Structure formats: C-alpha cells, structure tokens
Amino acid sequence: MRSQQDSAGGLRHLITLDGLTRDALTAILDRAESYRRLPGQPAYEGRELAGVTLANLFFEPSTRTRASFDLASRRLGAHVLNLDLHSSSRAKGESMLDTIYTLEAMNTDVFVIRDSEAGMPEFLIDHVAPHVSVISAGEAHVSHPTQGLLDVLTIRTHKRRFAGLKVAIVGDIKHSRVARSAHQALSTLGTTDIRVVAPQALLPAEGEFRAAQRFTRIEDGIAGADVVMMLRIQKERMAQSAFLDDAAYFRDFGLDAQRLKLAAASVLVMHPGPMNRGVEISSQVADGPRSVIREQVNNGVAVRMAVLASIAATLTRHRRPL
Ligand code: ASP
C-alpha cells in the first residue's frame, strides 16, 4: 500500500488510523477544535478547499457521515458531487476503478468512499493519480477513521487527557469498524485501560484489539468506566441464522440507567449512530445527562473539516502546473 502521508509528512489519504503517530492525531484534533462551532453559532466558513472538487461515493447506506462530509467540504469552499450510487454505473457493472477514472477526468481531486468490501480504499490509493486523495468513510468491518477521530475529540473535550482513562466499548465488536478505529486512536493517544465488552459470539478474533481487555458481562466491563461507547448491532454483517433476539440482547447487554450506575459518576455515554433504542441503549440513557451522542455528531463535522483541510494543503504540492 502507498503511504497515507507524502515524503514531507503531509496527509495525502486517510483510510486507517493505524500507523498515524500521536502527534499526527493531535494535530488533526487541534485543527478540528478551531473549526468547531456549537449548534446555534454561525458555522465556520473558509476557503481552505477553494478550487477542490470532492466526490462522495457511498456504496453503503449513510445519513450522518455523508451529510457530515458534504457540509464539511462545502464550509471550506469545495465543489461537491454526491452520487446516487444505487442507480450508478457500478450497479450497471462498471468497476469502481472506471468510475474513479471517469470522475478524475472531470478534475475530481478527493474521493470520499464508503464500501462494504474490505480492502477497497487500499486498492484505490494504489491506483489513483498522484494529485488525487482517497478518504475512507467506512470500510466494511475494518476501519472508520473519521469516526475514530470524532470519538477521541469528544473524549478529549470533556476529559482533557487519555492516559488513566477507563474506556469500555460495548456491543457488536466483531463487526464494528467504529470499535476498531476507536481502539487504534485511543491506544496511540495513551489510553491503557480499554475494554471490549460483548457476548462471546460478538467478540473479535484472538489477535485483534491487542491493547484491550475482553469482557463477556456488561456489568463487569463498564464497572468504574469513564467512557462507555455503545455500538449498534450490525445485522447486515451477520448471517441470517446469527440474528439476535432484540429483547434478549437488551436484557443481557443493553445500557439502561440501572447498569449505568456501575460506571464512574462522571461517565460519558457515546454511540456512533444510528441507534437502536431499546436494543443496545435505553432512550433514558441516550437522551440523559451523561450522553454526549449529539456532541459526537457536532465534532464529526469539525474533524472532517480538519482532515480535508490537511489533505488539501498536501495536495497543492502534488498538483499539475497550469
Ligand atoms: N455509522 C457507523 C458506521 O457506519 C456505525 C453503525 O453504522 O453502526 O459504521
């Protein structure tokens, strides 16, 4: 795989948080903080992406990530193309690479891609032109780098540190790209007490999540936790026969107000969305005083602006002269 960074260390692509240093992650978070505006404040408007054309190619459903990339890029002055891929050429059998080459010929500089096939972003960064960038907006169960960044930004805003925190990631770990990216970011930033908490069947393979402890009872996993990150049950990535009974799952693994008392009093409750209320989390907790779920959404736009601005700055060095 080509590197995500160019020879000068500038961010060229973003498809995984694996391999990015603590300084590289911190620089993105710092930049994101400068872009963040609270709901009700005027959104940041800038020209960092002036002259850049960005295509959002989502081959899996998405509401918040796609809207977030769309807003982030427009607020920095990019031209944005949102393709309806259910009726696109790929559905007619055109390869992903031909779609990319067609859009490259229309001067598209940045591709934001969500796909259910593991390895697709990596394949693309090996094939795009030298002046073109690829950003993953979710790769199968493997990686969701901007989600990982927005999660650690949300934690940093409240806790101001990563060392010494107890972070429990709870639910369908096995199929979760969110959990994988969060685990990578947290371990790089210095969190040593990371717990993955799931029924046995939804724990990841041995050898994955090396920095984390494993728990099969939610009560044990969230005890004393400073952060509880709940995950959606990814039924679309399970065989039909593995479908769980929602009520039984909530009984054994759902986060309700009673269970939340086991965590630290100052716990942050997180969820990447979309939430299945009453399956992995109760509405009382999701909408309650410890929830930072909507702050995650707000931070998502800021983080994507920061990633796009960093990439645009690098791209200027790789553009063809007029
Ligand atoms: N929106 C997140 C993702 O795309 C989480 C989820 O779908 O459960 O992975």
Image: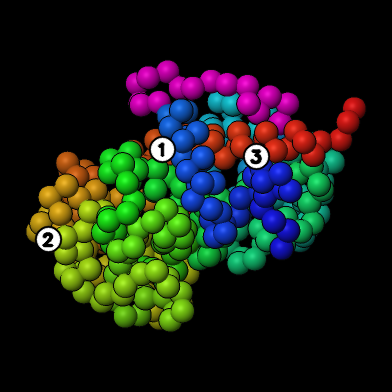
Sequence order check: which comes first, mark 3 or mark 1?
1
Amino acid of disc 1: Asn
Sequence order check: which comes first, mark 1 or mark 2?
2
Sequence order check: which comes first, mark 3 or mark 2?
2
Residue drawn at 26 percent across, 74 percent down: 215
Q: Quadrant of the C terminus?
A: top right
- Residue holding disc 2: 262
Residue 34 spot, x, y in % from top left = 46, 28
Amino acid of disc 2: Leu
Label number found at residue 311: 3
Label number found at residue 299: 1
Region in magenta? 37-52
Q: Are marks 1 and 2 in contact (CB under 8 Å)?
A: no
**Residue 283 can be seen in this image:** no
Residue drawn at 67 percent across, 35 percent down: 312
> Callout 2: 10 Å neighbours few (<14), some, many (20+)?
some
Secondary structure under tag 1 reads helix
